[in-house]
């Protein structure tokens, strides 16, 4: 079979349980890309990933995590786990974050990945202000499940417009770091959906992956 694409994908899976709707979403990405696009997906199950810095603190008198991470990055003192994550992000052209929506945000384990991996010097530069993201020419996508149905995440719904939930993650993290953000893949309340509806969610995701490399980024603004 002729190789159509050589793009590399990084999949970060932030869910503690495997027998959930998030896991089939992840497995579709792995199988689909290996078969159709001959990609080499990098998969990390974040609940088994430990990332620590090594070396002495830059300022032991007053701990500032952002400063310490920046200094450790500049001096090559980050842990090997963290260096490995940097290598994967550097090689990837598309990063997909698969997770359940917890408290209107990503789970703590995935937020911890953001805090540790997207450090100053690697992902962004503060002195240049907005638009100083260093991960340009890379795409990122949030693929997640919710506990509430779609009607709950509207302006009239009890949870409010989903764009307000997405904005801190898509604009405040991904776009700030230079990513071109693709439209999110949202599965609303799969736990309460009939079997056929859950299958349709997976089919829709699989269909989208066929043209994922052709998608254009979306504006990360509040509706």
Image (cartoon, rainbow, N blue to C red):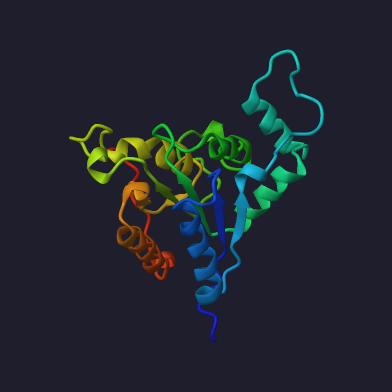
Please indicate whether residue 195 sits to the left or right of residue 90 in the image.
left
Quarter of the image where one finds residue 163: top left
- The residue located at (55%, 40%) in the rendering is 110
In the foreground, 206 or 211: 206
Residue 160 in percent (x, y) is at 26, 34
Q: Quadrant of the C terminus?
A: top left
Name of the residue lying farthest toward the right:
55
Above/below status of 52 relative to 89 = above
Residue that appears at 77% across and 40% down: 76
Toward the top, the furthest residue is: 61
Q: Position of residue 150 (x, y in %)?
A: 26, 45
- Using the rendered image of the protein, determine whether residue 56 is visible from the camera's viewpoint: yes
Asked if residue 137 shows in the view, the reply is no
The residue at the point 75 percent across, 24 percent down is 58
Above or below: residue 188 compared with residue 198 = above
Q: Position of residue 81 (x, y in %)?
A: 72, 45
Query: Left of 171 or right of it: where is 148?
Result: left
Of residues 59 and 155, the one nearer the viewer is: 155
The location of residue 171, given as percent across then percent down, is 41, 40
């Amino acid at each position: 079979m002729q190789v159509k694409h050589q793009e590399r994908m990084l999949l970060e899976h932030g869910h503690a349980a495997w027998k959930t709707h998030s896991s089939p979403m992840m497995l579709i990405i792995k199988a689909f890309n290996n078969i159709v696009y001959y990609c080499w997906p990098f998969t990390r199950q974040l609940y088994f990933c430990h990332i620590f810095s090594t070396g002495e603190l830059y300022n032991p008198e007053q701990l500032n995590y952002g400063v310490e991470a920046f200094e450790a990055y500049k001096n090559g003192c980050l842990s090997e786990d963290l260096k490995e994550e940097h290598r994967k992000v550097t090689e990837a052209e598309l990063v997909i974050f698969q997770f359940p929506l917890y408290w209107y945000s990503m789970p703590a384990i995935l937020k911890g990945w953001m805090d540790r991996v997207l450090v100053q010097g690697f992902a962004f530069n503060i002195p240049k202000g907005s638009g100083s993201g260093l991960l340009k020419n890379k795409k990122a996508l949030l693929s997640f499940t919710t506990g509430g149905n779609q009607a709950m995440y509207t302006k009239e719904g009890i949870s409010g417009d989903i764009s307000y939930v997405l904005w801190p993650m898509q604009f405040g993290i991904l776009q700030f770091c230079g990513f071109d953000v693709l439209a999110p893949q949202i599965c609303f309340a799969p736990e309460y959906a009939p079997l056929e509806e859950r299958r349709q969610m997976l089919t829709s995701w699989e269909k989208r992956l066929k043209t994922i490399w052709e998608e254009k980024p979306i504006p990360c603004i509040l509706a």
